[in-house]
Image: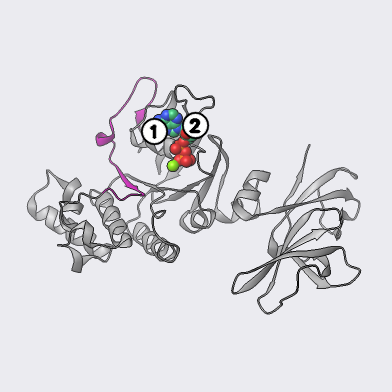
């Protein structure tokens, strides 16, 4: 069943040139996690705020569980939408304990009911031993888990999370990702998870919506977004792609570093660009090769080499962590990918 439907949502702030959100439409099924990902300023928070009811759309419709909550003639206030929210800064009440914070959204229920739900939530997020602590005595990760428990406790129809891990350090973020995804899935929560971090989006989302300049560039599964990018922007933003120029021939695509034997449905001689990631490119040491090592980045498990082709174009290639070669060395780069590559043509 469709939990959320957003149709042609538009928001333009006074005094700005561009619309913050420009005609966004998507649907979310019950129990699905949608990662909303895009660079800073692309309209992620504004989209969430309109769904939550914290902002009125200029036009468009928001529908929660088949009930219109925002349209030209309807505006249901946030507290009546049954939506739970988790923000970057946790926003816990400092004068309330962990348990009291979690109980906050349950006002109106019987004390026994509240006790039971709070107990379940504490258990779910692994904070039972800390139930009587105050927020100042918690770590960043613990505070974020309290915020999540507080949002989930009233069993919202939809959970909105706006860059919830961005104030945590890198190690903790990785840990929280796994933990929080497991919690959300065990609750079968319907979630929009906002992030500007591609990797986090690929990990958290059952599907991803990639935003740029207030519109959705592409929506799809993590695999589709990563391997079948519809636009250059998605390919670049989601996968750190390089783009190699080529020309369609009868036998494939001819490039500066050889022939890519991939059939494309384009006329011979069409100029194209091939999206390449570091693991699609390999190279051999070769004094008469087609490129030069410009830089090496050690990543622990592997090395990333930046290569400059004779045309001046840059490509990145990943190799084993044991292969240490000097900058300035001439090499022969070639396409080693054994899967179809994404091809863009200007047409
Ligand atoms: P994101 O969350 O993706 O970083 P936002 O939705 O916060 O992006 O912002 C989208 C655009 O709208 C930005 O250009 C931002 O400056 C602008 N914007 C957001 N809120 C307001 C506001 N209250 N008044 C004017 N402009 C705003
Ligand atoms: Mg934002």
- Examine the rendered structure and indicate whether residue 5 appears above or below residue 133: above
State the image quarter where residue 48 is shown: top left
Q: Which mark is residue 156?
A: none
Magenta residue check for 80: yes
Residue at mark 1: 50
Q: Residues within 10 Å of mark 2 (few under 14, many from 20)?
A: many
Q: Measuring 27% from the left and 40% from the top, which residue is drawn there?
A: 82
Question: Residue 63, can we see it?
Answer: yes
Q: Which residues are magenta?
A: 68-91
Residue at mark 2: 21
Q: Reading the chain from its start, which is encountered first: label 2 or label 1?
A: 2
**Mark 2 residue's CB less than 8 Å from ligand 1:** yes
At which x and y percent is residue 312? 82, 53
Q: Residues within 10 Å of mark 1 (few under 14, many from 20)?
A: many
At which x and y percent is residue 242? 72, 54
Outermost residue on the top side: it is 73
Q: Measuring 25% from the left and 34% from the top, which residue is drawn there?
A: 80
């Amino acid at each position: 069943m469709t939990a959320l439907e957003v149709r042609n949502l538009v928001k333009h702030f006074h005094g700005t040139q561009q619309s913050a959100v420009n005609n966004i439409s998507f649907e979310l099924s019950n129990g699905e996690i949608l990662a909303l990902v895009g660079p800073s300023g692309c309209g992620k928070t504004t989209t969430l705020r309109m769904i939550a009811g914290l902002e009125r759309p200029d036009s468009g419709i928001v529908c929660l569980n088949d009930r219109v909550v925002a349209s030209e003639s309807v505006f249901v206030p946030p507290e009546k939408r049954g939506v739970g929210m988790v923000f970057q800064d946790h926003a816990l009440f400092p004068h309330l304990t962990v348990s009291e914070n979690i109980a906050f959204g349950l006002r109106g229920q019987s004390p026994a009911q509240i006790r039971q739900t709070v107990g379940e939530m504490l258990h779910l997020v692994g904070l039972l031993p800390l139930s009587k602590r105050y927020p100042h005595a918690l770590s960043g990760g613990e505070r974020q888990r309290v915020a999540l428990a507080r949002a989930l406790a009233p069993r919202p129809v939809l959970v909105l999370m706006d860059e919830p891990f961005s104030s945590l350090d890198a190690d903790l973020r990785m840990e929280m990702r796994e933990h929080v995804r497991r919690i959300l899935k065990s609750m079968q929560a319907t979630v929009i998870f906002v992030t500007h971090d591609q990797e986090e989006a690929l990990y958290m989302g059952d599907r991803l919506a990639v935003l740029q300049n207030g519109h959705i560039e592409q929506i799809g599964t993590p695999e589709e977004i990563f391997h079948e990018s519809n636009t250059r922007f998605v390919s670049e933003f989601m996968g750190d792609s390089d783009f190699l120029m080529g020309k369609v021939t009868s036998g494939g695509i001819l490039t500066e570093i050889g022939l890519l034997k991939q059939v494309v449905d384009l006329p011979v001689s069409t100029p194209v660009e091939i999206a390449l990631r570091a693991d699609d490119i390999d190279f051999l040491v070769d004094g008469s090769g087609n490129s030069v090592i410009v830089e090496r980045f050690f990543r622990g498990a592997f090395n990333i080499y930046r290569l400059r082709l004779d045309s001046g174009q840059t490509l990145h290639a990943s190799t084993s962590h044991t292969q240490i070669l000097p900058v300035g060395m001439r090499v022969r780069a070639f396409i080693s990918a054994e899967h179809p590559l994404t091809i863009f043509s200007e047409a």
